[in-house]
Image (tube, helix red, strand yellow):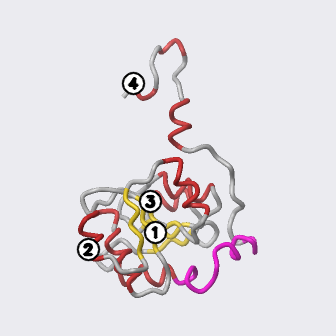
Amino acid sequence: LMVCALVPYKNVDTAVEAFRHLDRRLVVAGSGPMLDRLRQQCPKNVDLLGWVDDDEIPNLVAGCRAFLMPNVEDFGIAPVEAMAAGTPVVASALDGHRNVATDGVDALLGDIARGGRALERLAPALAPFITCDAMAWRAAGSLAAPATLPLWSTSTDSLMLPSSAGSRISDAS
């Protein structure tokens, strides 16, 4: 599963191309300027859902083997939410990901987004999820148990500065 904006630095096109050669299904939820081009080049085992409402994402995460994030940005909240739900993450081994995930415990972190060779590095990173079921990996104790957490959008809506500040955090920027 990938949940992201469909923009070049997210490497969605690389993931789509990697899955062209794999006998597994990739589900991509998101919209953006690359959507039409991705739909044109998409193999049959890749489902591009387009925009998905926030309340539908937990069901997608709960039903997937792994959350894929082969991008070149250093951090994103989506893999943290996936790990909180007990879903393993396959991500680039960038500092931001290493700060929130432990390679081999709740994530597989690899050098998959650097050096222009992301495609050849992505397929090997996915191998554990091709050869075994992440649910079995989780049951064997190799992954943390899922947590029940509110959606990020729900949590941020309830965050407030002290009443003496007189404004919401979103107004403070």
Q: Secondary structure at mark 2?
A: helix
Q: Amino acid at mark 1?
A: Val
Q: Amino acid at mark 2?
A: Gln
Q: Secondary structure at mark 4?
A: helix
Which residue is identified by label 1?
A: 27
Q: Which mark is residue 171?
A: 4
Image position, residue 138 (x, y; %): 70, 70
If you read the primary sequence from the N terminus, does the residue marked by circle 3 or circle 4 appear first?
3
Marks 3, 2: nearer the viewer: 2
Image position, residue 52 (x, y; %): 44, 53
Q: Give the magenta-colored segment's residue range.
A: 127-141
Which residue is identified by label 3?
A: 3
Tell me, yes or no, whether the highlighted magenta stretch contains residue 110.
no
Image position, residue 58 (x, y; %): 57, 54
If you read the primary sequence from the N terminus, does the residue marked by circle 2 or circle 4 appear first?
2
Q: Which mark is residue 40?
A: 2
What number of labels is visible?
4
Dot 2, crowdedness within 10 Å: few (<14), some or many (≥20)?
Answer: few
Query: Would residue 4 appear left or right of 87 to someone viewing this image?
Result: left
If you read the primary sequence from the N terminus, does the residue marked by circle 1 or circle 3 appear first?
3
If you read the primary sequence from the N terminus, does the residue marked by circle 4 or circle 1 appear first?
1
